Amino acid sequence: MQIIRVEDYEDISKKATEILLDRIRTAEKLVLGLATGSTPVLTYQYLVKDHQENQTSYQHVTSFNLDEYIGLPVEDPNSYHTFMDHHLFNHIDIPREQIFLPNGLADNQQQACIDYEKQIQNHGGIDLQLLGIGSNGHIGFNEPGTPFDSATHIVDLAESTRKANARFFDSIEEVPKQAITMGIGSILRSKEILLLVSGEKKSKALARLLEKQVDSQFPASALHHHAHVTIVADKAALQYTNEKSSVTQ
Ligand SMILES: O=P(O)(O)OC[C@H]1O[C@](O)(CO)[C@@H](O)[C@@H]1O
């Protein structure tokens, strides 16, 4: 696990953009795993800016998002479909048919999970997975207790997650109670993982992750089973961490 320590959120986003652009520009074909939440928003803005200024192309990129709420129409302002269109897809040249998000509106949700997993595999798996982390250690919507070998599945959202995400909705009652998410096993099958961690509110989760105790009650600790994980974190997020030796400045 490589840890890149930077000053603040802006620097996290610049570093993440640099890593993503390196892969996007050098690969002939690339499968990206993408995340929602607040953390990657500025990274997406920088990717859009780069596309406008340097015409970096996404014609050869396929993307799979980590998760989607169950029951929200695709066009709902809080659906992750809308989030991704708004922050990234509407502003770059990725072909629409190469964009995949879990289907939170399927009649047969179990089948939708199986289909999503198959689609990822049919595209040769994810080359680079972008991740954020929840305060309780969730990755994607994989809440504490999720088996590390889980594939795409339906999840009952933890109250703490619903509360944290209520900031995007008018009230907590409007936050869906379920979501469809890539599993921890799906995430671990990615060839490379890039985890972005910013701010004081993630500092305890990051400190716990860096204790290196693998525990299914702390989903992000599964990342210790992966050989190629890069964490980009700012000073505020790293405040409880004494791992100066493994930190790249
Ligand atoms: O970046 P944020 O908004 O702190 O969210 C962290 C994580 O929480 C989720 O948004 C789910 O609640 C993940 O998709 C994300 O990686």
Image (spheres, rainbow, N blue to C red):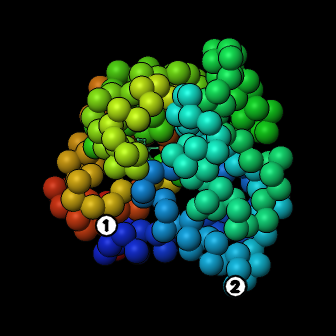
From the viewer's perspective, is 239 left or right of 229? Answer: left
The answer to whether mark 1 is within 8 Å of ligand 1 is no
Image quarter of residue 56: bottom right
Give SS at disc 2.
Answer: helix
Q: Earlier in the sequence, mark 1 or mark 2?
A: 2
Residue 155 location in percent, x, y?
46, 23
Residue position marked by numbered label 2 in the rendering: 53
Q: Please give the count of numbered marks on the rendered protein.
A: 2
The answer to whether mark 2 is within 8 Å of ligand 1 is no
Q: Residues within 10 Å of mark 2 (few under 14, many from 20)?
A: few
Mark nearer the viewer, 1 or 2: 2
Residue 74 location in percent, x, y?
65, 40
Label 1, label 2: how far apart the Cα atoms are: 27 Å
**Furthest residue to the bottom?**
53
Q: Amino acid at mark 2?
A: Glu
From the viewer's perspective, is 88 left or right of 149? Answer: right
Instruction: Identify the residue at image location x=36%, y=69%.
Output: 9
**Furthest residue to the front?**
170
Instruction: Identify the residue at image location x=45%, y=51%.
Output: 37
Residue position marked by numbered label 1 in the rendering: 234
